[in-house]
Image: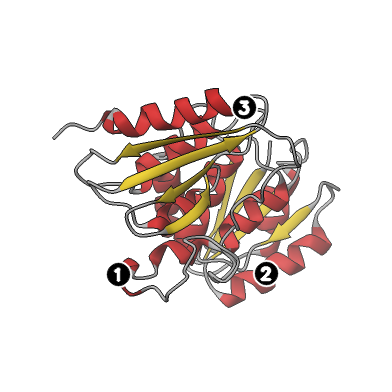
Amino acid sequence: MIGFVVVSHSEPLAQAAVDLAMQMIHGEAPPVRVAAGADGGFGTDAAAIAAAIDDLADTDGVLILTDLGSAVLSSELALELRESTQPVVISGGPFVEGATASIVRAATGGTLADVAAEAAGALAAKQPHGGAAEGDGGGAEGDEGAPAAAEASAPGAEAVEREVTVVNPVGLHSRPASLIVKAATGFDAVPTITDVTTGKGPARADSMIALLALGATQGHVLRVRAEGPDASAAVDAIADLVEDGFGEGE
């Protein structure tokens, strides 16, 4: 699993960002280390960051999340000080949104490239849903680095589709999106979701940011589609979640 080092000038800020991300985890959480503050105060410490990276030496890779520009500089210096050799990426994505999206993706088995892409494109979900430009794909290539929807499978692949209506009052917000990401993993299939009501999508069902960028609210009709040997099971797992309202009452 991918590990994370959260680098902030403020320890309370870093801990709050991690706590928010962990609220979205359903199952085993990825390992996260906080390297925040300098000498108990405000600032960053390259040696502390290096130690946090080394503490994650047995992971498949480490994503460093930073709050301000000088935190990036300290993280770059930490790469020269560390003793471990696992691959490390310093994210340039937004701090809070990037932490939530990438940690959720890592919890479902995402690679270092997957979680780095989630962090980098995390601002896409904050774009005004009502003012999106015509042709906005809700996570397609033009959305400031948001993960693109999966392309069609090879000829001959069996496709399964099912349309469901969003019934929970708040719609496809962070918690339901994280549940869909979890439901979309573990299948030999490529699930995507399109908001039929607005025409946005398709969005990859394993990307929290792409799902949030759809902006689907109560009453919207979603088309769940998948291709591959497990297409039917993948579509049913996601569609059932939507129809159940993600367990959220009125």
- The residue nearer to you, when weighing 226 against 66, is 226
- The residue nearer to you, when weighing 147 against 114, is 147
Q: Please determine whether, in this image, residue 68 is positioned above or below residue 75.
A: below
Q: CA distance from mark 3 to mark 1?
A: 33 Å
Q: State which mark lies toward you, 2 or 3.
A: 3
Within 10 angstroms of label 1, few (less than 14), some, or many (20 or more) residues? few
- The percent position of residue 144, horizontal first and vertical second, equals 55, 71
- The residue nearer to you, when weighing 159 against 141, is 159
Q: Residue at x 68, y 74 (%)?
A: 73
Which amino acid type is shown beneath numbered disc 3? Gly
Q: Please determine whether, in this image, residue 166 is positioned above or below residue 217.
A: above
Q: On the picture, is 231 further left or further right than 238?
A: right
Counting residues from the start of the chain, the first of labels 3 and 1 encountered is: 1
Q: CA distance from mark 2 to mark 1?
A: 39 Å
Is any part of residue 100 visible from this angle? no
- For residue 94, the mark is none
Q: Residue at x 23, y 39 (%)?
A: 168
Q: Secondary structure at mark 3?
A: loop
Q: State which mark lies toward you, 3 or 1.
A: 1
Which amino acid type is shown beneath numbered disc 2? Ser
Q: Residue at x 27, y 46 (%)?
A: 171
- The percent position of residue 12, horizontal first and vertical second, equals 40, 56
Residue underneath mark 1: 130
Q: Please determine whether, in this image, residue 178 is positioned above or below residue 183.
A: below
- For residue 74, the mark is 2
Which amino acid type is shown beneath numbered disc 1? Gly
Q: Secondary structure at mark 2?
A: helix
- For residue 186, the mark is 3
Is any part of residue 225 visible from this angle? yes
